[in-house]
Amino acid sequence: MPEPVLEARQIVKRFGRVQALRGANLTVYPREVVALVGDNGAGKSTLVKTMVGVHPPDGGEILFEGRPVTVNTPHEARDLGIETVYQDLALAAEVDPAANMFLGREILRPGLLGKLGFLDKPAMRQRSDEAFDALGVRIQDTAARVANMSGGQRQGVAISRAVTWASKIVFMDEPTAALGVVQTRNVLDLIQRVREHGLSVVLISHNMPEVFEVADRIEVLRLGERVAQLRPKEVSMEDVVAAMTGALTFHEEDRQA
Amino acid sequence: MSSTARGPRWRLTFIAVLALAAALFVAACGDDDDDGGGGGGGGDGYTMTLIAGVRGDEFYITMNCGAQEEARKQGVELDFQGPDEFDASQQTPIVNAVTQKKPDAILIAPTDTKAMYVPIKQAADAGITIVLVDTTLEQPDLAVSQIASDNEAGGSEAAKALGELIGGEGKVFVNNVKPGISTTDARAQGFEDEANSLGLDYVGMEYNDDDPAKAAAITKAQLAKTPDLKGIFGTNLFSAEGSATGVREAGKSGGVKIVGFDAGPKQMEDLKSGLVQALVAQKPADIGRLGVQQAVAALDGKPTKKQIGTGSVTLTKDNLKENPDIPYKSEC
Amino acid sequence: MTTPATPTDEVEAEELLEEEREPWWQRLVTGSSTSIALILVGLIVVFSLLRPEEFFDVNNARNIATDAAVLLVIAVGMTFVIITAGIDLSVGAVLVFAGVVAAKAMNEVGGDNWGVIFVGLATALASGLGWGLLNGFLVAKAKLPAFIVTLGTLGMALGSALLITGGVDQRDVPFKLVDTIGSGRAFGEVPYLVLIAAAVALVFGVILAATRFGRYTYAIGSNEEASRRAGINVDAHLIKVYAIAGTLAGLAGFMSLARFATTTIGGHSTDNLDAIAAVVIGGTSLFGGIGTMVGTVVGVFIPAVLRNGFVIVGVQAFWQQVAVGAVLIVAVYLDQLRRARYRR
């Protein structure tokens, strides 16, 4: 069993009086798709946010490739090679896809102009087009505002952005929740392709059929703690749901690959 | 709204511009009826513009009414313009635009004795006859005439009126606006001199920054300092109003008499309700009338009077009936 | 086959076949500032037809441009602020404060030379910058609503100016300043004030359109949280944006001082709304994320042309307010219609 690329141990997070995470765990191995499932309010989004620098945790530790790290800002997560596709997509709707793709990482013109902050828009546009093509995301006019695109296209932009920049892990929070059939298909294919690119994907999802289709492993979160680590090949969907609701309990075991 | 990108948008823009053009044509044509003299009919046919110190002020509106009347008599076409605020930065663009029109004469109440010199001089250099009304310039020589109320005389009238109200003797106080305004300063000075010569006990003057709340506070403080104060002169609307508020809040209504300046609608209300006991009213309509006359005289090549001081009328509740035309109007 | 206004997944396949990238000239023509620019051109045409000699004249154009110059400088700063979905109500007060402080400083130093003028300029810019930083800090760090913050600084700046001057306009301005920058012209034709305003609009327009700073401004206005998550230092950026607005208000104060040779304390109470109106007319959205500098320039000139044109045509003073208001509403309404067709 290879070493986990990212591991969260006993993460604690409080929001005022609400204890969102009570010692939650998450393990991500290289080159895998792991689904993080749980009922509403189990703490999935919160756990992810503590690991990507949106809200630093109140307790617990995070290990990246075996060594402890602190991830207090999204910047620090990105430096580690971790990218995120948030549930709300975190896209700036009034600007174009290329601008979103390069948000915070703009390509500047060479020389003096670049030092003054002048953007190299053609370069960014071209690189985005390449990225979209490579991932099979179909966007006709990369100069149009993201606000004018369909939900599927926006999802495509957000995922492309994360995948292009990530070097280790991509977190995806409910990527298909608002999509129709065709688009969901595209996203699931995309997720597989991402794994083929050499990255790991942590997929938060409610949708059992999807999870069973793409995930290598499933980690179940319930009431702010991990209650099971399962393999889709070895269990049924009902088992997973049962773990989510607490009807069944599983022991955490160290499984061989 | 599903449609192609071009059609309706272009149409809409086009319609809007047409509508604007139509509106402007109507406004431009509709105007000529408002101006005196139906354009060119009879008399001299001169064109003039009256530029007020501030647009919405009853003082200047009344001035315009008087000017329009005289313009009609003389066959003069008179425009009325004015800035939103009494300030040189807003009056200057108007003067510049009027200069473009090249009327025969401009009647103007400059909002700054120094800053308005340059634009008015440009108008004069373009051959336009200048008459200064109400306020003036540091260098007034470019004008054929300056017409204003004799504010010092007005202040003097106020002292006389207050003296009568308080029975000929007692302590009096001036609630003034701020230093550096020629009109209110002159009123305060005229009041002080006359009060002294009448034998009234002049206890002093304070500035209220044209703020009625401050004026009230000053009044109350003064009443506390001088419990036997009998009369107050407020040199403008806010000063008089604030003084009245202060007197009422100190519980001395009726005991302390107040004389105000100017006769706008609010001041008339205060007079009728007994908040103030007398008002010294200027005669802005006269200023307007005389302004047009002087301009016509200059244009006709006749001699003009360099300085004209118009008078004032002291209004009380009792003599209102005899002076129906004195209160300032909000429209002609 | 019609294209529905709301693309859905099912018809996406069809759409992909139909959509094609708009050619650049079409993008320019349907660009957000174009319809409003057309309206400006329309107004100029109408006034020129009504009064060809008086309106359509170099001298008049000079007047209009000079009248608009000070407001344009303020509006440039306001454009940045509004694109971030913020607002700055303090600009008129900061303008007055800067003018007052600059006049005082120049009087203290004394003399009538470029050195003194430079002192005045530096003082005006520094005071504007100070108020801008205060605004930015309170909005970004203390997380107070921009409306409230800038309303507060409006009061403080104007109050301070009144305290310093006792409410009386400061008139002692070095003559050289008034004579050269205030009323002087480059090449005998273009007033320096207009040149300064044009330069400011150009420089900041380029910054807005072509630099990272400009892009971050749009991004933050469009989605502040997304910008944060993308690693942009949103707080620092907001502070800078408000600082720009403040500094430009300071520059505007200095320009106004040069033009009128007095501090004109009482004449700027609606500058903030005039600037906001100009920016919005030009196509910038109050909700943030959208706007152009070209639009702002057009937006400043529309009321300027209207006011000048109305006086020349002879529209009576009271009708002017009605007419200006009506034109503004029509202009913004048209713009909204155009926006609506592109929005989902």
Image (tube, helix red, strand yellow):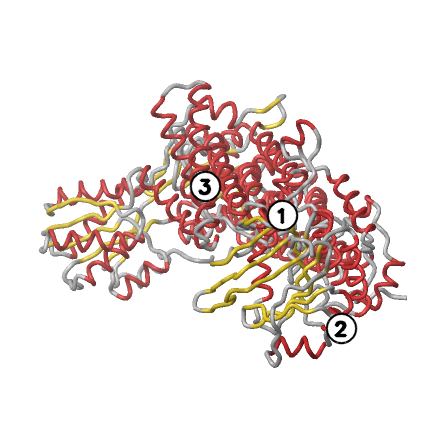
Please give left or right for residue A121 compared with residue C127 in the image: right
Q: Secondary structure at mark 1?
A: helix
Judge by depth and name the residue closer to the eye, A161 or B26.
Answer: A161
> Horizontal placement of C293 versus C177: left or right?
right
Protein chain holding label 3:
C
**Are discs 2 and 3 located on one and the same chain?**
no
Q: Amino acid at mark 1?
A: Arg
Of circles 3 and 1, which is in front?
1
x and y percentages locating residue C174 in the rendered image: 42, 24
Residue type indicated by callout 3: Leu
Q: Position of residue C115 (x, y in %)?
A: 44, 19
Q: Position of residue B168 (x, y in %)?
A: 11, 53
Q: Find disc 2 in the rendering and name its residue.
A: A209
Chain ID at mark 2: A
Q: How dense is the environment of label 3, judged by Cα within 10 Å: few (below 14), some, or many (20 and up)?
A: many
Give me the C-alpha separation between circle 3 and circle 1.
31 Å
Please say if the residues under marks 1 and 2 sit with CB atoms less than 8 Å apart.
no
Judging from the image, mark 1 belongs to the subunit labelled: A
Spot the residue most to the bottom: A247
Residue type marked 2 = Pro
- Pointer 1: what residue? A78
Mark 2 Cα-neighbour bin, 10 Å: few <14, some 14–19, many ≥20: few
The number of callouts visible is 3
- Nearer to me, A18 or B14: A18
Above or below, comparing residue A176 to residue A74 in the picture: below
Tag 2 secondary structure: helix
Tell me what residue is drawn at x 29 percent, y 54 percent.
B212
Crowding at mark 1 (Cα within 10 Å: few <14, some 14-19, many 20+): many
Circle 3 is placed at which residue position?
C133
